[in-house]
Image (spheres, rainbow, N blue to C red):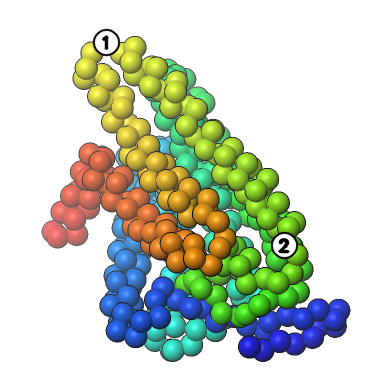
Amino acid sequence: MFYYMDPNNKTTVPYFIINGISNVPKLQLPIFLLVLLIYLLTLSGNLVILLLVCLDANFHTPMYFFLANLSVLDMSSSTTTLHKVLVAFLTQDKTVSFLGCIAQFYVFSSLACNELLILTAMSYDRYVAICNPLHYSILMNPRVCTLLATVCWVVSFLEVVPYLALLLEVSCYKSNIINHFFCDLVPLLSLSCSDTSALEMLSFVEGLLLLSLTPFVLTFTPYVFIIAAIVRIRTSGGRYKAFYTCSSHLTVVVLLYGTLVCQYLNPTREDSLESNKWFSLFNTAAVPLLNPLIYSLNNKDVKVALRRTLHVIKY
């Protein structure tokens, strides 16, 4: 364990050691291959969605505009968290600098917050499409969509700044070995021997109430009105079509929030860090992989566009 004294007489660590997903030697190669496969599939799936949205005029709609933002977020989040797992296996170097660790936490947390906000914007889009279809093109015009997406990106990166400031003030760590595969808040707090009450209070007030609960309420409230509108549709075919338009988004929302609840509502005791690690792995690896699959497998337009694109490439 190495420490040094900075000019302000605070004891800090020059670097952290990322423990990784598992310490069992026999599992290192299988884990590397599994993570590499998931990462490549995540990049491929989201890149296909992104290219379809950019190149196919049929996808120049608000729903697919927000889906393209979601694909960018998924690729960025996977790269931010999984790259160290892959690099550590290839180079056998598990160290990350103190500032590099804090930067990784900041970028990942900002992207995670942004994903919740983008899903909220997509929920509003589905609400307008089903509950107010006659004014959809006016209420969800390109300018409004661009403004909503911009607000989501800017707000998400600003919301995490208070965490960044408080983490930089932490002056004492019991160890520099992080029992995780990337720098996240919970494992960092478990290592601190400084007073982290301000961080824990911020995590509860801002993290739970502002960053999580508010998007949760704003995301699911429109579905109360959507379900009420669907129930009022007289024909079963009309009800099915209305529900079909928002089923993919609802599936992704339930999957993401369910994982976040399991991951971050656990106590920060040492015995809970292992379960937190696996929930985090599912959130950062499986969810970004499943998102394009859910939207493509449950969306006729995407499947038709893929077949059309593959046919053009073939001939």
On the image, the x and y values in percent for residue 107 come to: 58, 63
Helix, strand or loop at disc 1?
loop
Q: Would you place residue 19 above or below residue 223 in this image?
A: below
Q: Quadrant of residue 184?
A: bottom right
Q: Quadrant of residue 16?
A: bottom right
- One can see residue 17 in this view: yes
Q: Quadrant of the C terminus?
A: bottom left
Looking at this view, name the residue that lies furthest to the right.
Answer: 8
* Residue beneath the point at 48% across and 48% down: 261
Task: Indicate which disc residue 196 carries.
Answer: 2
Is 84 placed left or right of 161 in the picture? left
- One can see residue 75 in this view: no
* Residue beneath the point at 40% across and 81% down: 23
* Label 1 neighbour load within 10 Å: few <14, some 14-19, many 20+: few
Is 292 placed left or right of 168 in the picture? left
**Amino acid at pointer 1:** Arg
* Residue beneath the point at 50% across and 84% down: 94
**Amino acid at pointer 2:** Thr
On the image, the x and y values in percent for residue 180 come to: 49, 71
